[in-house]
Structures are given as structure tokens and as C-alpha cells.
Amino acid sequence: MANVLSPNPSDPRAIRTRQLILDAFIRQLNIKDFNTITISDITSHATINRATFYAHFQDKYALLEAMLSDAFTTLVVHRLDTEAQLTEETIRNLIAALCAYHESSQHCIKKYDSVALMIEENIKLQLESLILQLLTGTAGMTAQSKTLKSAATMLSWSIYGITYRWNRDGRTEAPEELSKRISPLIMDGISPLHT
């Protein structure tokens, strides 16, 4: 149902409309379960028509993915030097950024549980891609290496898991303390990649 003529992503009107859609969607996530939200709910709150919605997003799943991707970029990627190598400092920054991401997601979306699994999968995929990029620079290998891809998967799931547990268990320590405690364990795990 996607429109053949997609809006120009750098057009200020398209940017504003996209933001209206995202804001309306977030408002709906705060009052309704994701599964019960309709395109009509979103369009009426964004004060746009269905055709405009579909010019920007294929469906509400694509909208959720875009929202999560934007949040990940803002809260995680922008806090890191993505051209840097994977060092203990990078790991610490990544853990702290992911803690901020978890906090933000839970504060922004009151009906968080209804989208928790989709959020988890999205974060893991984006995190794996980011870590693979950092590992490629660190290990001097290509992203095609099976070992490197496996390491990126292992690291992304580990970092996600520890920050998820930190968030779920009530954030009993500051993100900086968590990152200082966990980063040496992660660095020991990836040290064989440097040889």
C-alpha cells in the first residue's frame, strides 16, 4: 500500500509530518497496547490522512522499527565514535549508552511490555551491526569473517542482557559503575580476536 512517490526525506514538510506521525504513535503507545493501535488512531491524532501515513511508513510495524532506530541512533550511536576501535573505554561508553536507552524506552512508552520483545530484537540487531563495525576496525578483519560475526552476536547479546537486567532489577548501581565492572569481562572475552 506504500505510495509510489515517497516524500523527500530532507524536505522540511516531510520531516515535520514524519515527526507528527511518530509523536502520535508514541502518544498511542502510552494509552493503548501496540496490538490494538490502528492506523486510524495514529492518523487522527497526527491530523493527517491515511495516504500521507502510507507515504511515510508501510504499516505500524515499520513505524515502530523507525521509532526504535531513531532512538537507538540518538541515545547510543551518537554517544560513540563509530570509527574507533573496540576498546575497554568504547565498551564502557556502549554499556552506559544502552542503560540510557533502556531508561528512555521505559519512560517514553507506558505500555512498554506490549512492545518489549520487538524492542529487544531491534536493539540486538542494531547493536550487533555497530559492534561488528567496531570489531572490524579493532581486529583488522573484514566483516565477512564468521568468527567476527559470531563475536559481534555474542557481544551484542551480552551487553544487551546485562543492561536489560540492570534496568529490570531497579538500576541498583549507576551506569558508570556497571560499565566499569562489566567491561573487563567483555574485554577478556574478545582478547583472542587481537591475536
Image (cartoon, helix red, strand yellow):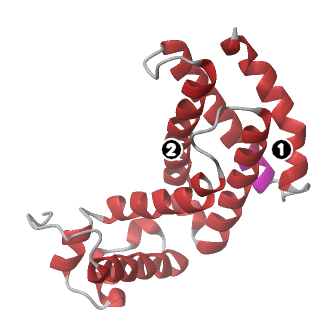
Image height of 51 relative to 130, above or below: below
Left or right for 3, reference 123: left
Q: Residues within 10 Å of mark 2 (few under 14, many from 20)?
A: some
Label 1 to label 2: alpha-carbon separation = 19 Å
Q: Secondary structure at mark 2?
A: helix
* Residue kind at label 2, given as amino acid type: Gln
Residue in front for this viewpoint, 75 or 141: 141
Residue 146, given in percent of the width and then of the height, sits at: 48, 14
Could you tell me which secondary element the residue under label 1 belongs to?
Answer: helix
Name the spot of residue 187 as percent of width and height, x first.
78, 26
Q: Looking at the image, is 113 positioned above or below residue 153?
A: below
Quarter of the image that includes the N terminus? bottom left
- Under mark 1, the amino acid is Ser
Q: Quadrant of residue 41?
A: bottom left
Please identify the quadrant where the C terminus is shown.
Answer: top right
Q: Residue at x 91, y 54 (%)?
A: 173
Q: Is residue 150 above or below residue 128?
A: above
Residue 80 seen from this side: yes
The answer to whether the residue labelled 1 contacts the one labelled 2, judged by CB atoms less than 8 Å apart, is no
Q: Quadrant of residue 162?
A: top right
User: Could you tell me residue 14's position as x and y percent?
Assistant: 27, 78
Does residue 159 appear left or right of residue 67 in this picture?
right
Q: Residue under circle 1?
A: 179
- Predominant SS of the magenta segment: helix
Q: Which mark is residue 131?
A: none
Magenta-highlighted residues: 163-168
**Disc 2 marks which residue?**
126
Taking the magenta stretch, the answer to whether it contains residue 166 is: yes
x 41%, y 82%: residue: 24
